[in-house]
């Protein structure tokens, strides 16, 4: 097949609009609840019971040494407890590429449950065992679980979804992250489990979604794109598609996958190094780095950190702040749920622009409001800014970047892209957690101007560079980005062949298929 015929075949390959079937809905629920929910839960779970956990650290140390910890040791131990979670997330992100290529998307999620169930048991029994060190270590393991799940779940669900539902399904993992955060906030309230007696149960509950996923996920199919393109098992891919679509006629989607497979035969599996040096994916790579950095460096964790004091300044009683915090979490869930329903009608690009734009404006006004808090009504403006920021982040900055990674990269480069995007996400998360205290001490409320500038820069970049990907096949998006990278389709394939010759081993059969594709 010649290049013109191949391109014509791609253009004529129109995939029917899919619908949300029971099987797709169930696998989405099981994958997102078992993995993404845990990520959100563990982001927030140690916030409310922190004083009681620190008392446990101190009492355990006193029982061993006969004296209480000094303040510096306690601060260091608690900082490790908090910061080891994003550090583990970074390690998990670095594991994504090798694991999804070797074990598949579903297989990786099943293995990932080990990094949740074992720590849940150990943390839940830490008080009885009188050891706080196990909590610190387990936070790394839980972080690895979050780092894997935050990348693999969007990849798994995105590859199984029809193109007209891919955006909505891609936002679902973020929705379950927000539900996990809200669940931890509710369960962590003083009258429930956020107490001296209840915190070990609170920490151990993270293993429940993992156990349910371990039981239920084997009942559902692997990603059809993984089965066909990476495993070469068309029969299993067809069977998986039939189950997911609820119909026998799936040849249209299989043909679209075959076209993608043919176009990528020269590429092989892209490593992270190849991804950084390959000109044909230059703007895709820059875009995911910018969006992931913008997502975390926009100050979302700092806003949550500052929220309690903003509420207190507005006159909310200290005992009631936890209820307002839960209200903030509820708004986050509702707005992310809204994003699920509007992402296919409004598109990805407008939600990214609107989301980061709202965060930018909210940070600017919040800086002014915090500096003028002596004015009687100004603290309420601060509360409104926090809620506006949460809304903006929920509909755009948090929800959409993972969807864009799915759509801007083809099958063979997607795992490496998720490794890069996930690593940037967790490194940025870790950086904000590490430096925000010093920023706050040095700059006070003016630290939000830095977040405002980052949001503004991200908006400008998205407006100038990032295309709309709504209702487009992976191949159509790839062709749009090829033009942006200054490459025509044939030149793109020839450069891919050069990269393959240098870095990807292949056999005679693969070489014949590659020559046929080119």
Image (cartoon, grey):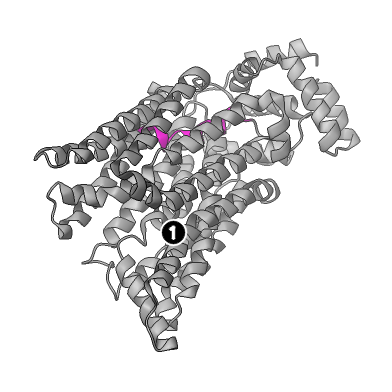
Q: In which quarter of the image is residue 46?
A: bottom left
Nearer to the camera, 295 or 76: 76
Would you say residue 247 is visible in this rendering? no
In the rendered image, residue 356 lying in the magenta stretch gets the answer no
Q: Quadrant of residue 413?
A: top right
- The quadrant the N terminus occupies is top right
Taking the spot 61% from the left edge, 20% from the top edge, the residue there is 481
Magenta-highlighted stretch: main secondary structure? helix
| Circle 1 residue | 209
Taking the spot 55% from the left edge, 42% from the top edge, the residue there is 424
Q: In the orientation shown, which residue stands out farthest toward the left?
A: 376
- The quadrant the C terminus occupies is top right
Taking the spot 57% from the left edge, 36% from the top edge, the residue there is 159
Left or right of 50: which side holds 315? Answer: left
Taking the spot 27% from the left edge, 71% from the top edge, the residue there is 195
In the rendered image, residue 402 lying in the magenta stretch gets the answer yes
Nearer to the camera, 327 or 66: 66
Give the SS element for disc 1.
helix
Provide residue 39's location: percent of width, then percent of height.
45, 53
- Which residues fall within the magenta stretch? 394-409
Provide residue 458's location: percent of width, then percent of height.
45, 28
Note whether 499 is above or below 120 in the view shown. above
Provide residue 230's location: percent of width, then percent of height.
71, 39
Would you say residue 39 is visible in this rendering? yes
Provide residue 398's location: percent of width, then percent of height.
41, 38
Note whether 422 is above or below 452 in the view shown. below
Left or right of 468: which side holds 482? Answer: right
């Amino acid at each position: 097949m010649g290049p013109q015929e191949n391109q014509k075949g791609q253009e004529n390959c129109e995939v029917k609009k899919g619908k949300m079937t029971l099987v797709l809905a169930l696998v989405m629920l099981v994958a997102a609840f078992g993995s993404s929910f845990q990520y959100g839960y563990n982001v927030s779970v140690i916030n409310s019971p922190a004083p009681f956990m620190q008392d446990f650290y101190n009492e355990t140390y006193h029982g061993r040494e006969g004296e209480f910890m000094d303040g510096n040791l306690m601060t260091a131990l608690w900082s490790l407890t908090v910061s080891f979670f994003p550090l583990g997330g970074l390690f998990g992100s670095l594991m994504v590429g090798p694991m999804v290529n070797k074990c598949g998307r579903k297989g990786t999620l099943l293995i990932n449950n080990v990094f949740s169930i074992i720590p849940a048991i150990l943390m839940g029994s830490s008080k009885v065992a009188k050891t706080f060190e196990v909590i610190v270590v387990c936070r790394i393991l839980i972080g690895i679980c979050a780092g894997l799940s935050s990348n693999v779940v969007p990849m798994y669900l995105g590859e199984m979804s029809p193109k007209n539902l891919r955006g909505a399904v891609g936002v679902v993992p973020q929705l379950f992250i927000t539900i996990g955060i809200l669940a931890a906030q509710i369960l962590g309230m003083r009258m429930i489990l956020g107490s001296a007696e209840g915190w070990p149960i609170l920490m151990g509950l993270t293993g429940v979604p993992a156990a349910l996923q371990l039981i239920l996920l084997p009942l559902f199919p692997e990603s059809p794109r993984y089965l066909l393109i990476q495993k070469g098992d068309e029969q299993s891919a067809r069977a998986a598609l039939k189950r997911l679509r609820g119909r026998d006629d799936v040849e249209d989607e299989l043909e679209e996958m075959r076209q993608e497979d043919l176009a990528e035969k020269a590429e092989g599996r892209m490593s992270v190094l190849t991804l950084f040096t390959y000109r044909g994916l230059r703007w895709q790579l820059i875009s995911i780095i910018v969006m992931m950095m913008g997502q975390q460096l926009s100050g979302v964790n700092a806003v949550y950190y500052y929220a309690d004091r903003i509420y207190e300044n507005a006159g909310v009683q200290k005992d009631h702040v936890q209820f307002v915090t839960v209200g903030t979490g509820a708004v986050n869930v509702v707005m992310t749920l809204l994003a699920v329903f509007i992402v296919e009608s409004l598109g990805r690009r407008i939600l990214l622009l609107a989301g980061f734009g709202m965060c930018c404006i909210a940070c600017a006004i919040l800086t002014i409001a915090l500096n003028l808090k002596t004015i009687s009504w100004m603290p309420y403006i601060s509360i409104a800014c926090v809620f506006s920021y949460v809304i903006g982040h929920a509909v755009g900055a948090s929800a959409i970047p993972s969807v864009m990674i799915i759509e801007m990269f083809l099958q063979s480069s997607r795992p490496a892209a998720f490794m890069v995007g996930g690593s940037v996400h967790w490194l940025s998360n870790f950086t904000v957690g590490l430096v925000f205290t010093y920023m706050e001490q040095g700059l006070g409320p003016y630290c939000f101007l830095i977040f405002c500038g980052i949001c503004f820069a991200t908006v400008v970049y998205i407006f100038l560079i990032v295309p709309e990907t709504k209702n487009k096949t992976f191949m159509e998006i790839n062709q749009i980005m090829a033009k942006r990278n200054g490459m025509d389709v044939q030149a793109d394939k020839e450069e891919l062949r050069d990269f393959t010759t240098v870095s990807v081993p292949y056999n005679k059969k693969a070489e014949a298929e590659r020559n046929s594709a080119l």
